[in-house]
Every structure is written in structure tokens, then in C-alpha cells.
């Protein structure tokens, strides 16, 4: 594939940015890729493993002359980083981000960006429980959705070009409105993560069941929760703080449903439980048919 | 390995029983294996795929002369099946089960068993989201724990022999007291399942987010929940109805923790969230070090 952007700058060098780099190299999507991370240890690691063509010691230097700048930092610091790089962005450049929350990022970043720069927020729906510059791999985005969430009035050529870039990385793309994005993600991602963290926290806290019992006997279901609850704490703290309203709304719905099931258990209402547990099977089938998960038992885990 | 039991009878032919059969054949643990399932369709399938050496049309016929009889039916019908086979069990035989709840099974089964039979309840902590006679495979129990939960006064030679049998199938074994078993499993299995069912139910119910959005964008975390929520509805209905007290106790703890996190989100208490999300990472590490899950990202899913 011929490069979609001549120069790309990655700000933040964690799982997503490092996977984007290896993906760009695999697919020939960028001429030259610069990278920057706030921690010098991360920059050293990146240099050691060949992550990015050039690692810069300041964000300003990394974004200089870049045609595409990617903010791949926790949602809570997007505004601060935008302020830092704003004055150094090339006129005509596209600025994007990969944050899991969109309304707050748009509010935080927009004030720092000149009108000559196209800001096209995006969110690749892909990840693993691992984090850091060494966790990336080229195929992370293959067959996953990347949502483009441009504010009203964004240049449509800039949106299309960023869409082609993500499709080049192997993704499917869709355009979505920010508030709807934040609600959908509260359901498919943010609440499941909070619930997994909670359940693992309960297990860890319980004095009458030891941690070693929890660990030994985890294969009965619990270990799936621990994978999600091993995700990056800083990233997830920021997600909940910045998608507060949608998260609290969905948690309210969740608690309501949980209480209904709890009541059915207390009252011995087997028919209610059976009907509920049958209905939820259909969604799993849909996900497998849509190619968004494997049908192999236990995710085809290596045993 | 030389057979541990000459004749084994499997009552119920779902995921666990069929995996036990293929495991016994792989490891040479039984001379002859008979099988019975209530549904004639299941018995036909079993005959077609060579599941069991002999498929019988009644449970009484299947258990005749068996040295080991395995109850592998939903927890809610254990008592009824025990009543049916009780009079036909060979003196000196061992009767076991593979139910996910132990106190209730002991109460339901014991009254129907003569004193000449050794009843040794057990629970292999292994499974997948698939069910039925065609879902079994020989390696299901490899490196998984099987808990033996004998009532007080059970013959120790019978317990040891059943332990050897499960170790022959590839499992680690432990002996546990029934009430403690039911509490530990409420934490590591029953509550995680209920919570996953609930979250998937919420997603399915939400009018402002369509099912197709939930399906397309599931890779951000939700799809892990759908695997658990695709488990057998009858089995899980019975688990919750028969482990009511422990499940409700742990759900109470869960809700309390969830409310604390919800409050931290509402108040913007980032430090509380970050500390919580950091602590839960340690349990994941423990599970991987104990060989109870893979360290590969996303469970090493086939992509």
C-alpha cells in the first residue's frame, strides 16, 4: 500500500500506539514515524526495540512537520498534551486520538487546536490486558471496529483519509456522534470493566476465602474476570472519571437487573432465571457470526 | 495406566460426562463404560459418535454391576436420579457426582443410598460455554482442580480411589468441607456467572443502544462476558436455586463494593479508583503463575 500520511507522530507509546506503529510498517501506511513518551524509560525501551523511526525527547519536536498526529495517552491528560503540542502543529495536519471516551476529549482538546488543523477524534475498539511499549503487535486492529467521532463541521476529506488509514491497519470503520459513542462504550466496555474490577476486589477482600483458594479454583469462571481486571489502572481511572454520566446510568440499569435476578434466586423463581439465561445466549451467537470472537471453547485458550 | 474401576456408569451425557469418557479412554482408567441420558435424542447422538462402550435405555440398567457411578446431571435433579438408581447399585460400589453445589446434593442424594454404597461427592472445576454430548474432549480436566467433598464418616479407601481416578484424568485433587466448598464456588464461579448474565441482559434490553451495536463493538471487553453468559441455562438455574445462601451473601458484598466504586466515580475520587484497579492486577498474576490461565494477551484467542 502507498503511504496514506508522509509523516506520522505518535504521542504516548503504550499498547495502542506501539500496535499502530507495527501495523503501519506491516502495511506501508506511513513514510516516517516519530514517537514521544513522557517517561524517559519508555523512550529508552522504544529505542531499544526499534519502536518508531525516530524517538524524540519532546512532544513539540515529535509533531513538527507531521501530517498525522496521534494522541495515545490516558484520557485525563489529552487536554494538557494538546496544549503542549498545539502551537507546533503543521497547518493542514490531522490531529487524532485513540481515547475510550469522546465527549470529554473533544472538550479538552479543541480549545488548543488552531483552525488550520483538522481534529478527528477516533477510538479503535481493540486492546488486551497488557500495557506499555512492548505490548504492541501489528494485527491488534485486524477485523476490529474503529469509530471516528468528528465534531460538527470537521473537514470531510480529513475524516475520509483517517478512515482509509484505519482500514489500512485492518479495521472496519464507522462514524458516530460523541454522546452516542460514550453511551455505547459504557455498555460494551466501561461497565463490564468496572464490574470485573469489583468482582475481583470482592474475592481479594473476603477473609473466609483465601487468595490461594481464589487462584487455584479460578478456572470455574472467575479467571475471565481477572483478565479484564488486569487492564491499565491509569487508563481506566480516567475513563470512569471522564465518562461519568453514561457509566453511572448503565450501572443503575445493571443494579436494577441484578436485584431482579437476586430476588428470583431468593424466591426460588426458576422459570425467571431459566428464561433470562436462555435469552443471553443469542447475543454470543451474534458476536461469533459477526467475526468479533472465536467459537472455540474457552476462547481456544492454550492449555 | 491400569483401570482404576472395572465398570463405570455415566448418568447424564453432557460436557462433563462426555469429557470424562474420552479422558478415561485416553488414560485407560476404566474397563467398560456404560452411559445413560434421559433424552432419547442424546442417547442416539452418543451411540452415533461412539460415546461410551454401551448406551443403556434406563438408568437402572446402566448402573448394574458398576464399580463407579457418576451423576452428571443438573444439580436440581440429582435427588430424583439417586432415587431411581439407588436400589440397583452394587454393594461396595462408589457413587459420585460432578455438581457445582455440594451441600444440597448431599442432602438430596444421601437418603436414597444404602449403607453398602460409598457416596463421595466431587466437583471438577473445569468447563466451557458449550454443552451437550458432542462438546466433550479428553483434556478438559488436565491441570484443573477436582474437589472431593465427602460427608463425614465416608470410607477413606473410597475417597482415595476416586482421587486417583481424577488424578488419572489429569486433575489436581483436594478434599473440602461442603459449606466451605459452596462459599468458595459462590466467589470463583456462581457470582461471576450471575453478573455476566446480568450485564449481557442489560445490553440486550437497552433501547438506545441496538443489539447490532453491542455485537459489532463487543471486542472492547463485553465479549468476554457473553462467553460466560452462553453457558447452559438449566445447569445454572439449578446452581443458583441450590446455592442460594452463599450466592446471596457474595452478591451482597459485590453490591456494596460496586456502590463504593460508583460513589468514587460520582465524586471524582481518582485516587480511590486507581488504588482499586492496581490491587486487582496481583490476583491475575497469581492465577497465571499457578498455571490456571494463559499469559497470552486476550487468552491467546485465535483471531
Image (tube, coloured by chain):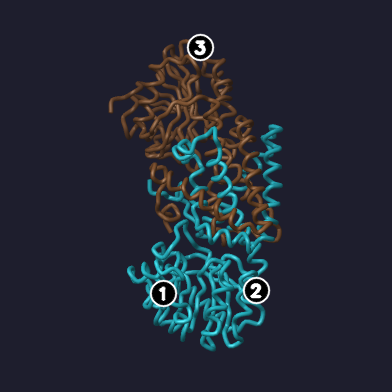
Chain colours: A brown, B cyan
| Numbered tag placed on residue B118 in the rendering | none
- From where the camera sits, is residue B165 visible? yes
Q: Quadrant of the C terminus of chain A?
A: bottom left
Q: Residue at x 54, y 71 (%)?
A: B173
User: Residue B189, located in which quarter of the rendered image?
Assistant: bottom right
| Chain to which the residue tagged by mark 3 belongs | A
Q: Secondary structure at mark 3?
A: loop
| Chain to which the residue tagged by mark 2 belongs | B
Q: Secondary structure at mark 1?
A: helix
C-alpha separation, residue under disc 2 versus residue under disc 3 = 73 Å
Q: Residue B142: where, in percent of width, then height?
A: 45, 66
Residue occupied by mark 2: B107
- From where the camera sits, is residue A56 visible? no
Q: State the count of labels.
A: 3
Do the dots labelled 1 and 3 sit on one chain? no
Q: Residue at x 44, y 17 (%)?
A: A64
- Contact (CB < 8 A) between labels 1 and 3? no
Q: Residue A41: where, in percent of width, then height?
A: 52, 35
In the image, taking residue B136 as reference, residue B111 lies left or right, namely right
| Chain to which the residue tagged by mark 1 belongs | B
In the image, taking residue A56 as reference, residue A213 lies left or right, namely right
Position of A284 relative to A133 (above/below): below
User: Residue A17, located in which quarter of the rendered image?
Assistant: top left
Q: Quadrant of the N terminus of chain A?
A: top left
C-alpha separation, residue under disc 2 versus residue under disc 1 = 29 Å
Q: Residue B243: where, in percent of width, then height?
A: 64, 62
Between residue A206 and residue B252, name the one nearer to us.
B252
Residue occupied by mark 1: B24
Position of B79 relative to B31 (above/below): above
Q: Give the mark nearer the N terminus: 2 vs 1.
A: 1
Residue occupied by mark 3: A114
Amino acid at each position: 500500500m502507498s503511504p496514506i500520511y508522509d509523516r506520522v507522530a505518535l504521542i504516548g507509546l503504550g499498547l495502542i500506539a506501539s500496535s499502530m506503529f507495527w501495523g503501519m510498517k506491516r502495511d506501508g501506511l506511513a513514510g516516517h514515524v516519530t514517537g514521544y513518551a513522557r517517561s524517559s524509560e519508555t523512550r529508552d525501551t522504544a529505542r531499544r526495540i526499534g519502536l518508531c523511526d525516530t524517538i524524540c525527547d519532546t512532544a513539540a519536536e515529535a509533531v513538527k512537520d507531521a501530517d498525522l498526529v496521534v494522541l495515545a495517552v490516558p484520557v485525563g491528560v489529552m487536554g494538557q498534551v494538546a496544549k503542549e503540542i498545539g502551537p507546533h502543529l503543521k497547518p493542514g495536519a490531522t490531529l487524532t486520538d485513540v481515547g475510550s471516551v469522546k465527549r470529554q476529549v473533544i472538550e479538552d482538546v479543541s480549545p488548543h487546536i488552531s483552525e488550520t488543523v483538522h481534529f478527528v477524534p477516533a477510538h479503535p475498539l481493540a486492546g488486551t490486558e497488557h500495557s506499555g511499549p512492548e505490548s504492541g503487535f501489528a494485527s491488534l486492529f485486524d477485523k476490529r471496529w474503529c469509530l471516528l467521532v468528528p465534531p460538527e463541521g470537521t473537514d470531510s476529506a480529513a475524516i475520509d483519509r483517517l478512515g482509509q488509514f484505519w482500514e489500512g491497519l485492518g479495521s472496519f470503520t464507522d462514524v458516530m456522534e460523541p454522546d452516542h459513542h460514550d453511551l455505547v462504550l459504557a455498555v460494551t466496555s466501561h461497565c463490564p470493566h468496572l464490574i470485573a474490577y469489583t468482582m475481583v476486589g470482592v474475592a481479594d477482600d473476603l477473609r473466609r476465602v483465601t487468595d490461594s483458594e481464589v487462584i487455584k479454583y479460578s478456572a470455574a469462571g472467575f479467571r475471565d474476570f481477572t483478565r479484564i481486571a488486569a487492564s491499565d489502572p491509569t487508563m481506566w481511572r480516567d475513563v470512569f472519571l471522564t465518562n461519568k454520566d453514561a457509566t453511572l446510568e448503565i450501572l443503575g440499569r445493571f443494579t436494577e437487573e441484578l436485584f431482579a435476578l437476586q430476588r428470583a434466586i431468593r424466591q426460588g423463581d426458576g422459570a425467571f432465571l431459566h428464561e433470562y439465561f436462555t435469552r443471553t445466549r443469542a447475543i454470543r451467537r451474534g458476536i461469533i457470526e459477526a467475526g468479533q470472537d472465536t467459537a472455540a471453547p474457552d476462547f481456544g485458550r492454550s492449555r
